Image: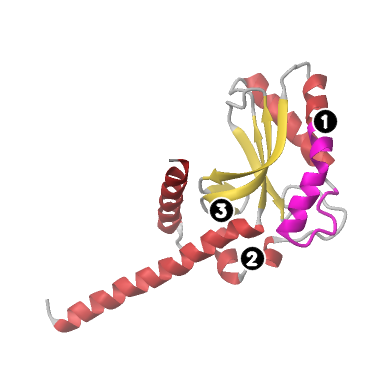
Amino acid sequence: MKLIEKSLLLAFILTVLFSFTGFAAGCEDIPNHVLRLHVLANSDSKEDQDLKLRVRDRILAESSRMMDHVTNKEEAQNAVRAALPKLKSAAADEIRKQGYHYPVDVKMERMYFSTRQYKTITLPAGEYDALRVSIGKAEGHNWWCVIFPPMCLPAAEEPKELRDVLNENQLQIVEGKGDFEIKFKTVELYEQFKNYIKQK
């Protein structure tokens, strides 16, 4: 291979690496600005999945004013922690109203999520803080959304939006402005490996 060809190949490889490094760094920081809601059904039966959606709706209704005046993720976490007893009571009440006797666990938890799409955004794989609602055995399919910025909460005032808490690079990542599919998969494999090592 000629020197000029080697130089061009090296330049191309370095460009790809630098491009990916910026992408990976942006992905790594996104969980620091986002709080998720995660509702797990008792099982995958139709009845349990329907119940999950009822509990979800009740939690969202109870949380509708929770993010008023909240300006960052730390404030959002504090608001959720303060509301945990109320949210657990509401979830348990909804389960009883629907004629079930499942226990329910409602807590803040840091947990691994694979790359997931919600409406028009894609959140990269990684460890996120989440309000986690586990119904019964919590062995069924889950439902999730973003509660800060409040993408799935009705708001009484102008809510914070993703553009208010993410930088331009991160915003392009979650909005999919660019061909990020392979990069998302690479980040997901890297995050899965990190999660695997952490559990060892």
Q: Secondary structure at mark 3?
A: strand
Q: Secondary structure at mark 1?
A: helix
**Is 123 rendered above or below residue 40?**
below
Q: Are circles 1 and 2 on residues that touch, CB within 8 Å?
A: no
Q: Position of residue 148 (x, y in %)?
A: 72, 53
In screen coordinates, is 94 left or right of 40? right
In screen coordinates, is 164 left or right of 170? right
Residue under label 3, please give it: 122
Q: Which one is in front in this view, the residue at disc 2 or the one at disc 3?
A: 2
Q: Position of residue 91 (x, y in %)?
A: 78, 30
**Is 143 rendered above or below residue 16?**
above
The mark that comes first in sequence, 3 or 1, is: 1
Residue under label 1, please give it: 89
Specify the amino acid type for callout 3.
Answer: Thr
Residue under label 2, please give it: 166
Mark 2 Cα shell of 10 Å, populated few (<14), some (14-19), many (≥20): some
| Magenta region | 65-89
Nearer to the camera, 141 or 110: 110
